[in-house]
Amino acid sequence: MTIAIKFCGGARTVTGSMHLISTNRSNIILDCGLFYGHRDEYYFINSHFPFNPQDIDACVLSHAHIDHCGNIPTLIKQGFRSPVYSTPPTRDLCRYMLPDSGYVQEEDIKYVNKINKRKGLPPRTPLYTQKEAEKSLKYFRTLDFHKKLEISKDISLTFYEAGHILGSAVPLVEVETPKKPVRIAYAVDLGRIGMPLLRNPEVPSNIDYLFIESTYGGKEHEDLKDAEVKLAQAITRTVKRGGKVIIPSFALERTQLIVYSIGELIKRKLISKIPIYVDSPLAVNLTGVFRQNLQYFNEETQNIFRQKEDFLAYSNVTYVKNVEGSKRLNSMTKPAIIISASGMCENGRILHHLKNNIENPHNTIIIIGYMAKDTLGKRIVDRSETVRIFGRPFDLKAEVVILNAFSSHADRYGLADYVKECGEELKKVFIVHGDPEQSEVLRSNLRKKLNIKPVIPAKDEVCYLSAK
């Protein structure tokens, strides 16, 4: 019997996670995420699958981040008609994430076509539209944690908690063979132990093969309590200067976590009670999904809500939905905290807030998440003297504070511990979802600590698994 894995995306890079598992009887994919890069590269890679979508029996979705789910509408446009399996919260989140992705692409193409028209170039079309994204939702089928389901002729699926975002899972895929099932676990993305709001990651037992992410494969997160102190200090400094705090944030999970953390700082009187504006229609909708799925959070978070204390709706928190409300934030002169998407500063309302605040040294930009290379967010992290926003140069004069401890990705120690807990039956580890240098450090770390030989597969590489 043949079991093959083809690493179709998210190999030796962070975005575009997608991996094909093929047997003599089945073809399934793990994730179907959008790859982020320069516009032409983005369009080409995301519109060309290294397999025929019509031949896929199932898509197994780990969680609702766009670099893991965002290319499902394209998959369906090209003929995929099988189920997309996810946990219930992931399905609920995708109801907003995918249409928002379609909307962003339509708006981006409008901008591109204005430029193309001036240059005499033909118009372009988006990868998919908001309406096409909405249509893709009918293919979702939910499977709760720890429930086993046969998803093809010889493959079954069980979801375990990943602890990364609401509803995120470590899918365990079991391939039936004449002797015993081959158990393949997919820990991409993997969360951290002891994070606020979320349950801890789980390790399925008796794993034969493991996919592991490496976003922070060579880095160690500082303690979250230390990061909260630094967050409080940065906010206090900015308030004393009379400035604004601008926080680029992913609408999903990171926004809710930072609202919770700032609220805790206010409750503990570590910072003054200043206005907080969550300027992201998507974040507003996703926060509603959080409230509808409380049973998937950790016990402490559930207890908070049982006591009728909604940490997402403190009196000083305003959720901004319309464009007019967003524009009014630019004319504010008093200190405030503005949390806005997108997380890597590539699109969305955060661009307007950066444009209006980045050249004022009284202001502070707080980075609380991973920034991929070639993004505006990464140029801010690197403290480039000048950055381009909407095609115009701006001097980076605002203070920049980087707090990676708020990341919901496991660091080098968390990743190594997870691999170690998989047990001695583990035949091979595939390191994916990371920049090459981070993947290499993780591989070296695992070799030294666990005496195993992990593989860092290249994109489109094929690996054959042993059924023994």
Image: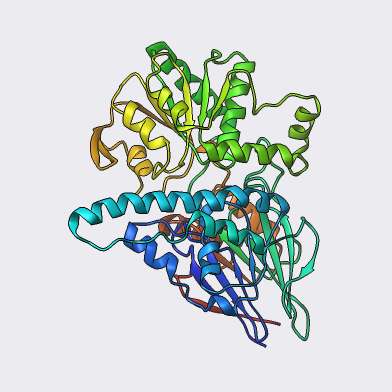
Foreground residue, 439 or 303?
A: 303
**Lateral position of residue 200 relative to residue 353, left or right:** right
Above-or-below relation of 40 to 307: below
Q: Residue at x 42, y 13 (%)?
A: 334
In this orientation, does residue 202 appear? no
- In which image quadrant can residue 35 be found? bottom left
Q: Residue at x 59, y 47 (%)?
A: 96
Residue 83 position in % (x across, y down):
67, 68
- In which image quadrant can residue 72 be found? bottom right
**Lateral position of residue 253 relative to residue 247, left or right:** right
The colour mode here is: rainbow
Residue 448 position in % (x across, y down):
54, 59
Above-or-below relation of 449 to 370: below
In this orientation, does residue 430 appear? yes
- In which image quadrant can residue 380 be found? top left
Residue 338 position in % (x across, y down):
47, 27
Foreground residue, 113 or 342?
A: 113
Foreground residue, 294 or 202?
A: 294
Q: Residue at x 48, y 54 (%)?
A: 102
Quadrant of the frame with the C terminus: bottom right
**Lateral position of residue 279 relative to residue 449, left or right:** left
Q: Number of labelled discs?
A: 0
Quadrant of the frame with the N terminus: bottom right
Above-or-below relation of 387 to 416: above
